[in-house]
Amino acid sequence: MSEKTVVPGRLRRRKLSMLLVSLTLCTASLRAQEVEQEEMFCRDMGDIFCTLDEFSESLTPAKGLDAKPGPAPTEKQKSRIDRSVIDLQQSRVETVLDLRGQQNLPQEVRMINLNPDVNSWFLLKLVWNPQKIEWFHLENGMNKDLNLELSPTYHNGIVLINANGERSQCDLWGQLGKSALYGARSANTPYAKICGTDLYLRNKIDGYKTTKEWVVEFLRANIAGGETITTIVKETVYKDNFLIKSEGNIVKNADGVVDLPDAPEPAKINEAYKGEQISTTQLGISLEGNKGDALDAGRWYRSEKQSGVFVSAIEPRAIDAALLKSYPDYAKPLDNVEMGAAAYLIAFDIGAFDLSFAVGTDHPAVGWSERVLPEVRDPALKGPDGFQTIAPLTPTGLIPPYMADRVAGIFTGGFKRDHGAFHWGVLSKQNRGSHYGFVENGVVLSELQPELSTLVVYKDGQIDFKTWKEADNETVSRVRFARQNGVAIIDYDPIQGKGVPGRYVSNWTLGNWSGSQDRKFRSLRAGVCLQNRGARRFLIYGYFSSMTPTGMARVFQAYNCSYAMHLDMNALEHTYMALYPPKKGGERVPQHLVRGMKVLDERFKGNVPRYMGYPDNRDFFYFTRKPVTKAP
């Protein structure tokens, strides 16, 4: 498949524009029609909405929630009203420096260590007078090797204490507008170094947004029925747009699948397809022992650039037949197109790599999702957690500079807040719609919700994949990074001792899968799973060129994953995955799981990689090679 096929061309954009215009006009005119006509439209468009009520909700602007006073808030509601993201941090430590009466200094300085066990994010609050209050978000790149203090004997800044207990002073606000703090704020960079060490002020920078994202957000926010329009576009213009499949003229490898002992377990393949090769003309990662455009189905190959990284390719038709028929109550049959759609997978040995997570400059956001039911949306609250912004924290959408040299791989995160809550089923009626939660550097930005699929990294670096439970909230202080995204694609069955398809994997409504109501909508999707092989553990990222969640489950099931979670979908920028070679001097040019993703690193002149060279509005995960521990 040519690169032109992967990246829509001018003609496709022209068709998309014409379709958007016609659909916008059509949707606007529908508002004036009778109920019978609305029902007919809903039926003729393939049951985009289940009921007339849901359809009319999407076309009629919501009535003012605060048009008249409601009942007095309950004590539980009061605990959430007017709170900020700071209030979510159960283990935070605050210290106050009273400087009233001091000339040319703030009246009060408050420093908040948001999670002392992680010791990474700090907030500084400078109170000059009741009308002038300033917040600064600091990031400590040395974690436990550098402590920050306010001292009653030092009024101009903070005291730094290194791993040896040595103390030094850092003037941050003592020189008014010429101080280090204000100099760092005026620097046009997301991370401005201060105090001559790996301590940074995080600055607000706009993240990059594609034209497609802008159009979709505009439609949803400004056009009645905008969500309907975007759904129709996905089902017509973008359906199978990224489909990769073998053309049937690839020579079969008579040697069968080669099993690398240090790699993940190979996929469980149908005997008739062993040695079958999958087209990899769009694969952008160079591999040891393979220079062609095809890989043996289900086999793992070593990356040529990074040790401990492996790549595989498969199509569902090659999966063991008995496996494809297993758990029929949960996983429905795949159609012919999906059976031949290629999936590319890349695995990282997590004994060699650390995993981190970061939010983008705008997403996933913390306000209310428009998907939540009116009866669970509390009009007294600005968001499900009580706030609609993470201020005074500053999202950067960029890997911090002190981590950049160790980066080995990057992939985009999950759904935006727009789609990150439930509209149907039990989960839609509990916990204010069960918005997907997330944690960065030990700081809870949105509360983790029970029964949601959760990728967790603990303070000690251990990675866990689980369905979050109410009892897990008792240990949330141990979490350094976490991201939730719907329900499980593969869930662990302790009785069978293996992963099985999630119970809602073929249920479009209860699974909250973005797609069409008929549950047959194929699309470009991404997901991630965990596989255990002996003492080794692997985190596997999957790129599914044209599949449903059911197809994803079958692929992850074939690779014996113990747990799997859906990520994002529909576009290369939402399924982006880049592999970085080790830093050995000179420029580090990433390789991409799919060649077409390269355009996302060429938005500016030269090689300016996404998340490394410029901030992005989307959340992301990144792998860093574990530091080498020197022998004593």
Image (cartoon, rainbow, N blue to C red):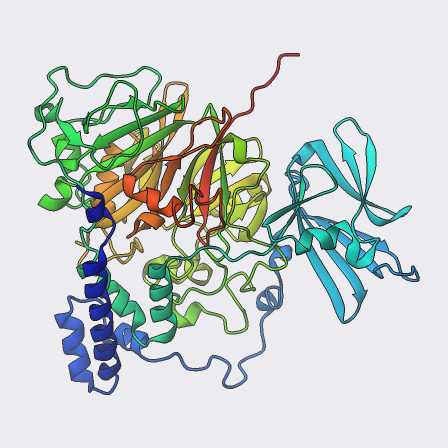
Image location of residue 577, percent across then percent down:
36, 40
Image location of residue 570, percent across then percent down:
28, 52
Image location of residue 285, percent across then percent down:
31, 31
Q: Residue furthest top?
A: 632
Can residue 319 be seen here? The reply is: no
Residue drawn at x 40%, y 72% is 374
Left or right relative to 332: residue 171: right
Can residue 174 be seen here? The reply is: yes
Q: Is residue 45 above or below residue 200?
A: below
Q: Quadrant of residue 478?
A: top right
Can you say which quadrant of the picture contains the C terminus? top right
Q: In this view, does 76 lie above or below 320?
A: below
Left or right relative to 128: residue 31: left
Q: Quadrant of residue 234?
A: bottom left
- Nearer to the camera, 481 or 402: 402
Image location of residue 155, percent across then percent down:
87, 50
Residue drawn at x 58%, y 50% is 190
Can you say which quadrant of the picture contains the N terminus? top left
Left or right relative to 27: residue 67: right
Residue drawn at x 36%, y 44% is 576
Q: In this view, does 14 lie above or below 620?
A: below
In this figure, what is the number of numbered marks?
Answer: 0
Q: Residue furthest front?
A: 605
Residue drawn at x 47%, y 28% is 353
